[in-house]
Amino acid sequence: MVTYKKMSEPGSREINEDFVSLAEKGSTLCCVLCDGLGGHGKGEEASKLVANEVINFFMNNDNFIDRMDEAFEVAQKKLLEEQKLKSAKHEMKTTAVILVITDKEIRWGHIGDSRAYMFKKCRYKKRTLDHSVPQMLVLARDIKEKEIRNHPDRNKLLRVMGIEWGASSYVISKKMKRKKNLSFLLCSDGFWELIDEKNMSSLLKESGGDVNKWVDSMSEVVKVNGQGKNMDNFSAIAVMV
């Protein structure tokens, strides 16, 4: 059994440039979360376009778990075409994170700094690595992991959708076997920057397996920690297996 919940709020911004979507086909679930970049509403258009393209590809093609790379490529091509049509080459960009769960396997992929987290038995296990300047500094051991959230260059992204790729810029995980007691969280930076992994895990445990309670309690923490700040849009999709 798989349960899930999605949410997206504008924070302190007038426009919500995040976009979340999910779809089921047979026994397979596909989740997509995008965080648009560019402002003036163009980021909003980019995130919606990419998410919709991914879901359309999922619904219209078999064996999506082995074709996630094609979904990224199709969405990227469509976004670049739309940029030209609207003369918005520099305004329409977006991050993207995708999670697919079949009756036997699980896989995720991402580009940018929207994250996918995995938990097992309510314990945080791993997450995607941001395509950002601070993440590179962590990998180079110049700063610590916990310093990413408040780093002055945290919003400087190295890879996104909507710029020409010299090579495939997205990262797709290896497939893993579907097992019990796994939980996943897809979220934009406006969400994860205001709640840490320890808090995510403790609230997951307190939720007692209720995905709605888990998302609602995390959202409250994000809102409390964001008070008095120029809060970014914050969005999430949570899935419990």
Image: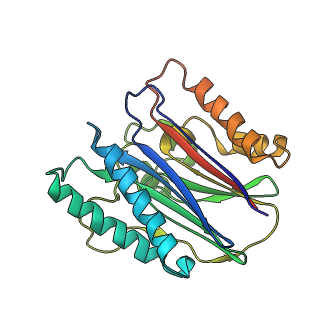
At 71% from the left and 34% from the top, the residue drawn is 217
Give percent across and percent down for residue 47: 38, 51
Q: How is the image coloured?
A: rainbow
Q: Nearer the viewer, residue 213 or 109?
A: 213
Instruction: Tell me where residue 222 sits by quadrant.
Output: top right
Question: In the figure, 57 relative to 161: above or below?
Answer: below
Give percent across and percent down for residue 110: 47, 62
Q: Is residue 59 visible?
A: yes
Give percent across and percent down for residue 225: 59, 26
Q: Specify the quadrant that holds the N terminus.
A: bottom right
Q: Nearer the viewer, residue 220 or 8?
A: 8
In the rendered picture of this protein, how many numbered marks are placed on residues?
0
At 73% from the left and 42% from the top, the residue drawn is 212
Give percent across and percent down for residue 154: 41, 42
At 36% from the left and 56% from the top, the residue drawn is 49
Instruction: Tell me where residue 3 sits by quadrant.
Output: bottom right
At 44% from the left and 38% from the top, the residue drawn is 151
